[in-house]
Amino acid sequence: MFRPTKRTVSDEGKQFKPQTVVTFYLHGQLETGKVVKQLQNAAIVEIKETTNNDEVIFQTQGNTVVSYQDLHKKS
């Protein structure tokens, strides 16, 4: 039986460690969130709940996958 090879995080993703606060666009709206888990070319992000994004939180259950190219560290 094969064991899956461990995939490493791409160079773009190394700056987005878990718990890093990030911004990204989702459905044309600027959202803020926190990286929960790093994948090879993307990260699972927990979306910060606000009064303006109740529907997005409901649809995504508060988490979404975002490409590292679309993430920006919040300053």
Image (cartoon, rainbow, N blue to C red):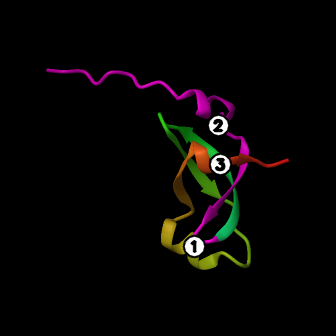
Crowd around label 1: few <14 · some 14–19 · many ≥20 (10 Å): some
- Tell me if 64 is positioned left or right of 1 in this view: right
Q: Secondary structure at mark 2?
A: loop
SS label for mark 1? helix
Residue corresponding to mark 1: 56
Q: Which residue is mark 3?
A: 71
Disc 3 and disc 2: Cα gap in Å?
Answer: 13 Å
How far apart are the two marked residues, 1 and 2, measured between alpha carbons?
22 Å
Q: For the residue marked with disc 1, what is the amino acid?
A: Val
Residue 62 placement (x, y as % from top left): 57, 62
Is 12 inside the magenta-drawn segment?
Answer: yes
* Labels 3 and 1: the sequence-earlier one: 1
Q: Which residues are magenta?
A: 1-28
Query: Are the residues at dot 3 and dot 1 in contact (C-beta closer than 8 Å)?
Result: no
Amino acid type for the residue under numbered disc 2: Pro
Left or right for 39, reference 13: left
Binning the other alpha carbons within 10 Å of mark 3 as few (below 14), some (14 to 19) or many (20 upward) gives many
First along the sequence among labels 1 and 2? 2
Image: 13 above or below 28: above
Please, what is the three-letter code of the amino acid marked with disc 3? Leu
Tell me which residue sits at (79%, 49%) in the image: 74
Which residue is under mark 2? 18
Q: Residue furthest front?
A: 69
Which residue occupies 57% across, 71% down? 27
Q: CA distance from mark 3 to mark 1?
A: 18 Å
